[in-house]
Amino acid sequence: MNAIHVIHSGLLTTIQDLGRWGFQKDGVSVSGAMDSFASRIANFLVGNEAHEATLEVTMLGPTLRFEKDALIAICGGDFSCTLNDEQVSLWKPLFVKSGSVLSIGACRNGYRAYIAFAGGLDIPLIMNSRSTYLQAQIGGLHGRALRKGDMLLLRSSDRPIFPHRVNWGIAVSARVYIYGKKKTIRVTEGIEYATFTNESIHYFFTSPYKITTQSDRMGYRLQGQALERNTEQEMVSEAVTFGTIQVPKDGQPIILMADRQTTGGYPRIAQVISVDLPILAQARPGDVIQFQKTKFEEAQQLYIEREREMNRWKTIIDQKWREIRGTN
């Protein structure tokens, strides 16, 4: 049977792809992988397209038993991973023999990892996505996180598995992740940026902000220097997106994440640039953030460069698989 049994579920393990786009007008969140960089690379390593669903692991991962030979890849934070009690590496294809047990332990650095399966998970599409939207209980496996006893089915893959040749990997993690307790996050000005006092804007870029324990896939609540506006004017709820930084009445910023609401009524002081969202996704409660102002044009150029880098890695990985097929 082409199945994977969940022996232990981990702290929070959900099925996520690149998101449920096109339904925000109906009040449905995009959701999707918090760290799309790691999810995409994991899919490339097993021969999938970037949008295939992966398992998103948070802080402490699951234990899975495979009922059929499979090809997987694990990318993201620095987790302790074992296959049949032997340590395995991240950022590489991994052949898993039928009957094997994969255990994802605690995260030593970072916060999230992504497990991709060649062929993809056999999960129904809900509004063109397999992502789990926890608040609405849709997508993924019954709209919830994995539980002990769950069974995941895999779709067939046209990627041939050559166990004796699956012994290579790539070294990209150091180029995107910043480990450690303090992280610099680049932002552009938000829509209501000019409504904050000069003193608050100064504090925003010079004072550290700690991620509190009241943080999840919906948003990161920060603790630090309170911010004030120079107007008491009420706002009409407007569209928000991944990385929008809102400031409620208590002055403590909130960064909206993958499961954010579709609109918000708090002033938006800044927007995290796209290429730094994976760094933010790998931050955990207790970590400290320092914001750095970036021009919109620079953010665009950084995004273009990141996508070129992704295409380059996909080309390298595809070439490697062609070489393997040609020598077997």
Image (cartoon, rainbow, N blue to C red):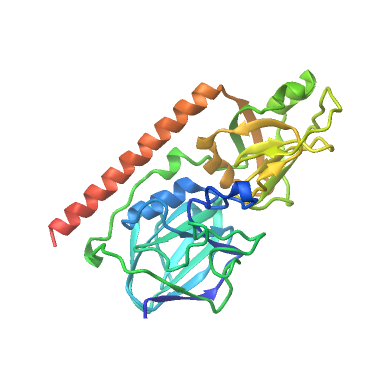
Q: In which quarter of the image is the C terminus?
A: bottom left
Q: In which quarter of the image is the N terminus?
A: bottom left
Q: In which quarter of the image is residue 87?
A: bottom left
Residue 284 on image: x %, y %: 63, 49
Would residue 132 be found to the left or right of residue 203 on screen? left
51 over 228 or under it: above or below: below
Q: Could one spot residue 202 in this view of the protein?
A: no
The residue positioned 34% from the left and 56% from the top of the image is: 48
Q: State the residue at coordinates (19%, 53%).
A: 322
Query: Please, is residue 47 above or below residue 68 in the view?
Result: above
Determine the residue located farthest toward the right in the rendered image: 232
Please give left or right for residue 258 compared with residue 48 in the image.
Answer: right
- In the rendered view, would you say 306 is above or below 74? above
91 relative to 230, above or below: below
**Where does the image place residue 61, in percent across and percent down from the top left?**
54, 64
| Front in this rendered view, residue 263 or 87 | 263
The picture places residue 169, in percent across and down from the top left corner, at: 32, 52
Residue extending furthest left? 327
At 67% from the left and 59% from the top, the residue drawn is 135
Residue 43 image position (x, y, % from top left): 38, 54
